[in-house]
């Protein structure tokens, strides 16, 4: 597997192919998830080949947005299956990567430790101090696609999502869950103004 060469190639492809500069699902989000995957993997003790597979899945997990937001996980897998053989990935490795990508689909349902790490990395921002800033970009994107009508509807969705969401890895539960609770309280407080 040629992960380093793949990373350079694919981030450039994402940047060049981004339709209409999406405010959330863009290169910055991909890099954010990549970095979160590295950090969670380190805390969970994942190294070597498994880490390379995880980082590859992080690169491709939302690449389907190059085509559109609907069923983007399946499209991300199609793109991965098309590109990864050129970077010396074997079919069984690509299957594992696609399983990780599919585990990020909401509601998340990871079946093994690698899938849990990527699922937590994809929603790492829920338990970070920059939650409101990142959430605003996701709101703007949802407005763009017509998935929500206004901030009140968005905040109601956010509250429901934050209440039902759970982190899967021990390190994310320990580090992100307490901050996620604070973020939930902030959104509830904001909702009172409507």
Image (cartoon, helix red, strand yellow):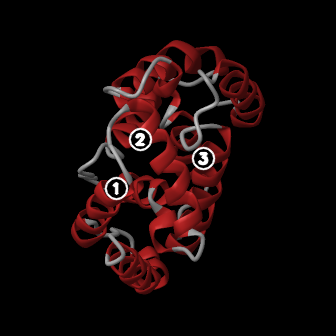
Please report the residue visible at 28 percent of the width from the left and 53 percent of the height from the top. 110
Please report the residue visible at 42 percent of the width from the left and 87 percent of the height from the top. 178
Position of 89 relative to 60 (above/below): above
Q: Name the residue furthest front.
A: 194
Mark closest to the chain's N terminus, 1 or 3: 3
Q: Are marks 2 and 3 in contact (CB under 8 Å)?
A: no
Residue 194 found in image quarter: bottom left
Position of 58 relative to 41 (above/below): above
**Which-is-in-front pick, marks 1 and 3?**
1
Position of 194 relative to 28 (above/below): below
Mark closest to the chain's N terminus, 2 or 3: 3
Q: Are marks 2 and 1 in contact (CB under 8 Å)?
A: yes
Return the residue nearer the eye: 146 or 119. 146
Label 2: element kind = helix
CA distance for labels 1 and 3: 20 Å
CA distance for labels 2 and 1: 9 Å
User: Where residue 48 sits in the image (x, y, percent)?
Assistant: 61, 53
Residue 158 found in image quarter: bottom left
Label 3: element kind = helix
User: Where residue 113 sits in the image (x, y, percent)?
Assistant: 36, 59
Label 1: element kind = helix
**Residue topped by disc 2:** 142
Q: Are marks 1 and 3 in contact (CB under 8 Å)?
A: no
**Residue topped by disc 1:** 154
**Residue topped by disc 3:** 29
């Amino acid at each position: 597997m040629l992960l380093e060469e793949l990373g350079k190639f694919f981030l450039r492809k994402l940047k060049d192919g981004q339709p209409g500069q999406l405010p959330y699902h863009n290169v910055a989000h991909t890099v954010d998830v990549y970095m979160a995957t590295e950090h969670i993997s380190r805390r969970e003790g994942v190294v070597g080949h498994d880490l390379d597979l995880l980082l590859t899945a992080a690169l491709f997990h939302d690449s389907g947005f190059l085509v559109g937001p609907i069923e983007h996980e399946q499209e991300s897998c199609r793109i991965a299956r098309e590109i990864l053989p050129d970077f010396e990935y074997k079919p069984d490795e690509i299957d594992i990567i696609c399983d990780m990508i599919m585990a990020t689909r909401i509601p998340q349902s990871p079946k093994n430790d690698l899938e849990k790490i990527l699922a937590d990395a994809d929603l790492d921002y829920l338990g970070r101090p920059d939650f409101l800033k990142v959430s605003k970009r996701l709101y703007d994107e949802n407005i763009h696609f017509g998935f929500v009508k206004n901030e009140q509807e968005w905040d109601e969705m956010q509250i429901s999502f934050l209440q039902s969401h759970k982190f899967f890895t021990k390190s994310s539960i320990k580090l992100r869950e307490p901050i996620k609770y604070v973020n939930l309280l902030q959104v509830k407080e904001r909702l009172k103004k409507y």
